[in-house]
């Protein structure tokens, strides 16, 4: 599997640019489907059908992943109101781990304040 990301509505466009600058396919939900009106279930379905990792701060995605196995691949950001600049530093720090695990297939990775949790 290839590492591709789909950023949810509350993820800054700078995060999309970060992944693109690293050579990965990245899109923002505001650029596809019904933009910021898109339902979480439709985002998950699109991501699963097109091989994207959903990047979100929304716990609803985490609950859906754990209960319904969708989205199949989820990066849950649990860093509160961290600035985008600091989020990019955290993503840079964990990028090899993210690529390694998400390239295998179904996976949930949660990044929090001082921790990273991987559920495959």
Image (cartoon, rainbow, N blue to C red):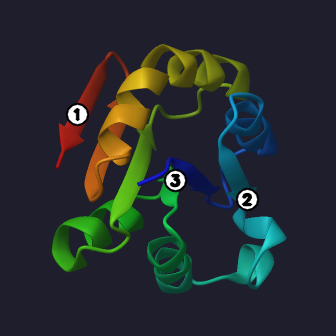
Q: Residue 69, relative to residue 19: is it above or below?
A: below
Q: What element carries label 3?
A: strand
How many angstroms separate mark 2 from mark 3 (CA)?
11 Å
At horizontal 30% and vertical 73% (from top left) the residue drawn is 64
**Disc ID at residue 56:** 3
Task: Give neighbour class at mark 3: few <14, some 14-19, many 20+ (Cα, 10 Å).
Answer: many
- Helix, strand or loop at label 1? It is strand
Of tags 2 and 3, which is closer to the observer?
Answer: 2
- Residue 109, given in percent of the width and then of the height, sits at 31, 42
Which of pointers 1 and 2 lies earlier in the amino acid sequence? Answer: 2
Query: Where does the image place residue 20, in percent across and percent down from the top left?
Result: 75, 38
Disc 2 on helix, strand or loop? Answer: strand
Percent from the top left, x then y, of residue 89? 60, 15
* N-terminal label among 2 and 3: 2
CA gap, disc 3 and disc 1: 15 Å
State yes or no: discs 2 and 3 in contact (Cβ < 8 Å): no
Task: List the residue tagged with mark 2.
Answer: 28
Answer left or right for 20 relative to 79.
Answer: right
Total marks drawn? 3
Quick one: quadrant of the N terminus?
Answer: bottom left
Does residue 102 lie above or below 111 as drawn? below
The residue beneath circle 1 is 117
Q: Dot 2, how many residues are within 10 Å of its Cα: few (below 14), some (14-19), or many (20+)?
A: many
Please tell me in which quadrant of the rendered image residue 94 appears. Answer: top left
In percent of the image, x 72 and y 82: which residue is there?
37
Question: Residue shown at 27%/52% (left/top)?
Answer: 107
Task: Please tell me which of labels 3 and 1 falls first in the chain.
Answer: 3
Label ID, residue 90: none
Asked if the residue at tag 1 contacts the one at tag 3, i.e. Cβ–Cβ closer than 8 Å, the answer is no
| x then y, percent, for residue 115 | 28, 21
Query: Taking 109 as reference, is 68 left or right?
Result: left
Residue that lies at the very extreme toward the front in this rendered image: 1
């Amino acid at each position: 599997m290839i590492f591709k990301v789909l950023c949810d509505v509350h993820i800054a466009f700078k995060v999309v640019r970060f992944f693109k600058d690293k050579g990965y396919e990245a899109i923002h939900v505001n650029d596809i489907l019904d933009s910021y009106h898109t339902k979480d279930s439709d985002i998950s379905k699109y991501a699963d059908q097109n091989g994207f990792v959903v990047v979100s701060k929304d716990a609803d995605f985490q609950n859906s992943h754990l209960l319904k196995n969708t989205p199949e691949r989820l990066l849950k950001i649990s860093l509160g109101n961290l600035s985008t600049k600091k989020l990019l530093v955290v993503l840079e720090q964990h990028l090899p781990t993210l690529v390694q695990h998400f390239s295998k297939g179904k996976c949930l990775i949660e990044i929090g304040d001082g921790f990273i949790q991987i559920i495959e």
